[in-house]
Image: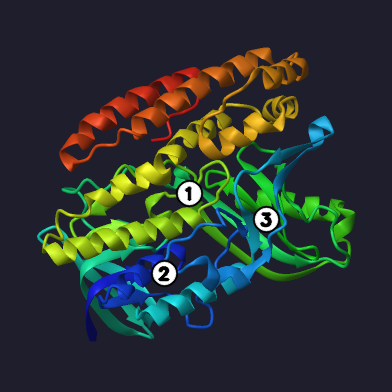
């Protein structure tokens, strides 16, 4: 058995893990990154490859270090195909957008993290959490059959959706959110496909509903001839049936005739609100491991990077103050203030989608102008001016009941957003805040008729 001692151990070398490790290593701390894949495969992660917020990354690994992985920076809108209405809805995407080569991006952030001084332990599968008197003190795993133990002042969980660390840690006396189930997560499957001729929509992210409201197909152009094609679906659905939906759609598209599949990969990701608290004594969760993904689009790269930075900065402060049990709470506040509150509000629309028939939903969306949809998808709020209201009214005859329903749900989403923006500044205030949040969610379920999600 090998035993290692570090200031911080990070489990996982994805975006959140690398940004956490690089942030701490730049400050001179001893940092280990424990990664289950070998050195060649590390960074090879299933992803849609779309990156919103491409203009802004934390300084620990700045944009200049990863920009070579940006393969398409000409994308500026979403193209929603609605076959049942014979409609294509073009929706502007606010902010800088890029499609990336995710494996190349993964290599670049690992290189930058190693250059910052973090030590990588590849081929190491973490299987258990070390704890003393309720405080997490590190992790245990195996590398090529040999037990490896990593002791640290702070453990950062960057192990992704449904993390094994959270399964094995005793979090019963911590604020850490354990109200987590597989039904709050989505499975994703994607292929990288080379097509013979350039597609004529290489400036758009293409979305298309599946036959079930639980999923959607995507076509994201890395280049005019290299396309990331895939689908996301709730874990409550039968995966193979939905994968066949993707295969069927690919066969129906002339531009994919003679195409070659060069890579296949699947993964799980959260389609839920952020964890109420992602901290416990000696432990902080980041990225997918803390539910930090836009639940309406599945986008999470930029948020993961910032969550990694915030976790490392609070860990550094906790270690320097000698208060590793208490000083991590501000991480939750920073996440909620930056993007977590918005993600929680967006989850209301996810809840609504589970109570609406797919044909009804797509028919209604086809009647709406793109601006308020884009605003709702990315900000959690939708303000409709007189001109947009008139456009909406003209196109929505026959959907007025559904639009009124969405208007009521939108009001609840904004009320929830306001509540998250008053996230408590101390752990003792969390239970009262949760009670008030849950009362808003009860009205969401009552209004939508959806089954409770949490």
Q: Secondary structure at mark 2?
A: helix
Quadrant the N terminus occupies: bottom left
Could you say which quadrant of the image residue 123 lies in? Answer: bottom left
Residue wearing tag 3: 230
Nearer the observer, disc 1 or disc 3?
Answer: 1
Left or right: residue 251 versus residue 414 is right
Residue wearing tag 1: 293
- Vertical order, 126 against 388 (above or below): below
The percent position of residue 378, horizontal first and vertical second, equals: 55, 40
- Vertical order, 253 against 274 (above or below): below
Q: CA distance from mark 1 to mark 3?
A: 18 Å
Left or right: residue 216 versus residue 252 is left
The percent position of residue 11, horizontal first and vertical second, equals: 35, 69
Nearer the observer, disc 2 or disc 3?
Answer: 2
Nearer the observer, disc 2 or disc 1?
Answer: 2
Q: CA distance from mark 2 to mark 1?
A: 17 Å
The percent position of residue 322, horizontal first and vertical second, equals: 11, 64
Q: Secondary structure at mark 1?
A: loop
Left or right: residue 28 versus residue 229 is left
Q: Residue at x 45, y 38 (%)?
A: 342
Residue wearing tag 2: 18
């Amino acid at each position: 058995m090998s035993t290692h001692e570090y200031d911080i151990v990070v489990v996982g070398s994805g975006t959140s893990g690398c940004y956490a490790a690089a942030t701490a290593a730049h400050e001179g701390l001893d940092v280990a990154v424990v990664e289950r894949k070998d050195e060649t495969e590390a960074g090879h992660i299933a992803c849609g490859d779309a990156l919103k917020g491409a203009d802004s990354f934390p300084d620990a690994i700045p944009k200049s270090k990863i920009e070579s992985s940006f393969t398409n920076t000409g994308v500026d809108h979403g193209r929603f195909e609605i076959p049942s209405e014979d409609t294509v809805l073009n929706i502007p995407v606010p902010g800088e957008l890029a499609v990336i080569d995710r494996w190349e991006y993964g290599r670049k952030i690992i290189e930058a993290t190693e250059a910052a001084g973090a030590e990588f332990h590849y081929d190491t599968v973490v299987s258990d959490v070390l704890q003393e008197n309720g405080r997490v003190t590190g992790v245990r795993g195996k590398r090529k059959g040999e037990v490896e133990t990593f002791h640290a002042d702070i453990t950062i969980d960057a192990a992704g959706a449904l993390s094994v660390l959270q399964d094995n840690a005793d979090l019963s006396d911590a604020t850490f959110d354990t109200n987590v189930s597989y039904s709050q997560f989505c499975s994703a499957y994607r292929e990288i496909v080379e097509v013979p001729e350039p597609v004529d929509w290489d400036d758009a992210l293409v979305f298309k509903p599946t036959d079930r409201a639980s999923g959607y197909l995507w076509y994201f152009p890395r280049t005019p001839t290299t396309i990331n094609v895939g689908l996301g679906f709730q874990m409550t659905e039968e995966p193979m049936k939905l994968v066949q939906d993707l295969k069927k759609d690919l066969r129906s598209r002339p531009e994919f005739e003679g195409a070659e599949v060069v890579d296949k990969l699947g993964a799980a990701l959260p389609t839920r609100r952020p964890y109420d608290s992602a901290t416990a004594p000696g432990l902080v969760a980041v990225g997918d491991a803390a539910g930090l993904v836009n639940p309406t689009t599945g986008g999470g790269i930029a948020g993961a990077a910032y969550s990694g930075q915030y976790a490392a900065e609070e860990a550094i402060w906790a270690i320097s103050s000698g208060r590793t049990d208490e000083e991590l709470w501000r991480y939750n506040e920073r996440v909620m203030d930056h993007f977590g509150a918005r993600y929680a509000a967006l989850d209301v629309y996810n809840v609504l989608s589970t109570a609406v028939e797919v044909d009804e939903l797509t028919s209604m969306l086809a009647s709406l102008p793109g601006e308020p949809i884009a605003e709702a998808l990315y900000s959690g709020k939708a303000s409709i001016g007189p001109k947009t209201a008139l456009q909406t009214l003209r196109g929505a005859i026959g959907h007025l009941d559904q639009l009124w329903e969405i208007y009521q749900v939108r009001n609840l989403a904004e009320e929830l957003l306001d509540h998250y923006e008053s996230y408590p500044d101390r752990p003792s205030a969390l239970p009262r805040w949760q009670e008030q949040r849950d009362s808003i969610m009860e009205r969401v379920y009552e209004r939508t008729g959806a089954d409770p999600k949490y």
